[in-house]
């Protein structure tokens, strides 16, 4: 039988939880099909940045890609709800939502959306984002006058402004020198990023604001999908559900390890008044969430 090699893309480096979970899925696929279907992983953005990778996946040049939600927003605008501040109470709540009917419904809509050209296979964790700077940020008042780097989406910049700081959209690769020279006073991300990008060398305090918890997805090329038999499609779906759970466990271990290392490097983790930040960001949820009130209510009702 002819061998099928599925090309998988990730912008994250080798060993990262999302990469490792898809590689593990590949081993299971190889075993289940006696070597008929394999996954070849290309980590570290070697096949291009996310935008190019999605285009390649839509064309069928790449079969499998781990992507952020911004890319699918145009196809299924509802996923933008996950980008809003404090839409999830915590990571456990977010997982309940993506593992349940809401998560399943959104995956189906991404797959069947107009002009999608992608099959949405599952969700992946990207952790909780916290503010980090040279000092603790426990209340909105603490952010006064502070320039904080945000991802380049008006929603995120406005979120930081509502939280009390000055949101600055800036490319991720420019961030370390900007922190070193004081062009920005801080940024926000998860603990593994603070460690891996050496931002901790400048920003010694991570304040547990937990303002954004944004899951990611992994998708399959619809063009390539249609070339698989029904049985192979079912197998890929089954293994994708397992990969979603496996990545989560890897993510938890990865985060714990990063936190331990950061503490050893002198980084402090400061508690923050989440209720105050929640209240401050209500106008953002009102502005960006008004169209999706029903979905937001369903998320809030998920126990």
Image (cartoon, rainbow, N blue to C red):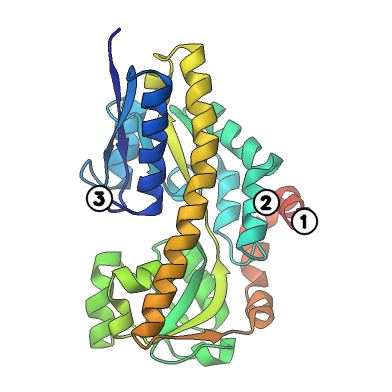
**Residue at position x 58%, y 54% from top?**
82
Mark 2, residues whose alpha carbon is within 10 Å: few (<14), some, or many (≥20)?
Answer: some
**Residue receiving disc 2:** 96
**Dividing the picture into quarters, in which one does residue 257 lie?**
bottom left
Residue 166 lies left or right of residue 57; in this view the side is: right
The answer to the question of whether label 3 and label 2 lie on touching residues, with beta carbons closer than 8 A, is: no
Q: Which mark is residue 172?
A: none
Q: Secondary structure at mark 2?
A: helix
Image coordinates of residue 128 in percent, x first then y, are: 52, 66
How many marks overall? 3
Q: CA distance from mark 3 to mark 2?
A: 30 Å
**Residue at position x 67%, y 58% from top?**
93
Label 3 vs 2, first from the N-terminus: 3
Which residue is nearer to you in this view: 192 or 173?
192
The answer to the question of whether label 3 and label 1 lie on touching residues, with beta carbons closer than 8 A, is: no
Q: Which mark is residue 303?
A: 1
Q: Secondary structure at mark 3?
A: loop
Q: CA distance from mark 3 to mark 1?
A: 36 Å
> Looking at the image, is 179 positioned above or below residue 121?
below
**Dividing the picture into quarters, in which one does residue 58 lie?**
top left
**Residue at position x 45%, y 11% from top?**
229
Label 2 vs 1, first from the N-terminus: 2
The answer to the question of whether label 2 and label 1 lie on touching residues, with beta carbons closer than 8 A, is: yes
Residue 226 lies left or right of residue 87; in this view the side is: left
Image coordinates of residue 116 in percent, x first then y, are: 47, 30
Image coordinates of residue 166 in percent, x first then y, are: 45, 81
Image coordinates of residue 161 in percent, x first then y, are: 51, 77
Considering every residue shown, the one lying at the far top of the view is 1
**Residue receiving disc 3:** 44
**Residue at position x 24%, y 70% from top?**
174
């Amino acid at each position: 039988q002819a061998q099928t090699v599925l090309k998988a893309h990730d912008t994250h480096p080798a060993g990262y939880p999302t990469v490792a979970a898809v590689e593990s899925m590949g081993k299971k696929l190889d075993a289940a099909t006696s070597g008929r279907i394999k996954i070849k992983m290309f980590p570290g953005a070697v096949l291009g940045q996310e935008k190019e990778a999605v285009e390649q996946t839509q064309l069928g040049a790449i079969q499998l890609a781990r992507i952020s939600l911004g890319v699918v927003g145009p196809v299924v605008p509802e996923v933008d709800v996950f980008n809003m501040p404090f839409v999830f109470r915590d990571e456990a709540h977010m997982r309940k939502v993506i593992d349940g009917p809401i998560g399943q419904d959104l995956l189906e809509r991404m797959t069947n959306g107009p002009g999608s050209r992608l099959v949405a296979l599952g969700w992946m964790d990207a952790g909780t984002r916290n503010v980090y700077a040279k000092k603790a940020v426990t209340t909105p008042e603490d952010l006064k006058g502070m320039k904080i780097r945000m991802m380049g989406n008006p929603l995120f910049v406005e979120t930081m402004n509502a939280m009390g700081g000055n949101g600055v959209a800036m490319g991720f690769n420019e961030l370390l020198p900007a922190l070193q020279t004081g062009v920005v006073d801080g940024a926000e991300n998860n603990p593994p990023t603070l460690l891996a990008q050496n931002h901790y060398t400048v920003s010694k305090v991570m304040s547990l604001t937990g303002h954004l918890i944004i899951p990611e997805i992994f998708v399959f090329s619809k063009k390539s999908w249609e070339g698989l038999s029904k049985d192979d499609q079912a197998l890929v779906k089954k293994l994708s559900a397992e990969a979603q759970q496996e990545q989560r466990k890897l993510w938890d271990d990865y985060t714990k390890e990063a936190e331990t290392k950061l503490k050893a490097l002198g980084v402090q983790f400061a508690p923050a008044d989440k209720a105050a930040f929640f209240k401050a960001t209500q106008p953002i949820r009102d502005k960006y969430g008004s169209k999706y009130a029903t979905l937001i209510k369903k998320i809030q009702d998920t126990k």
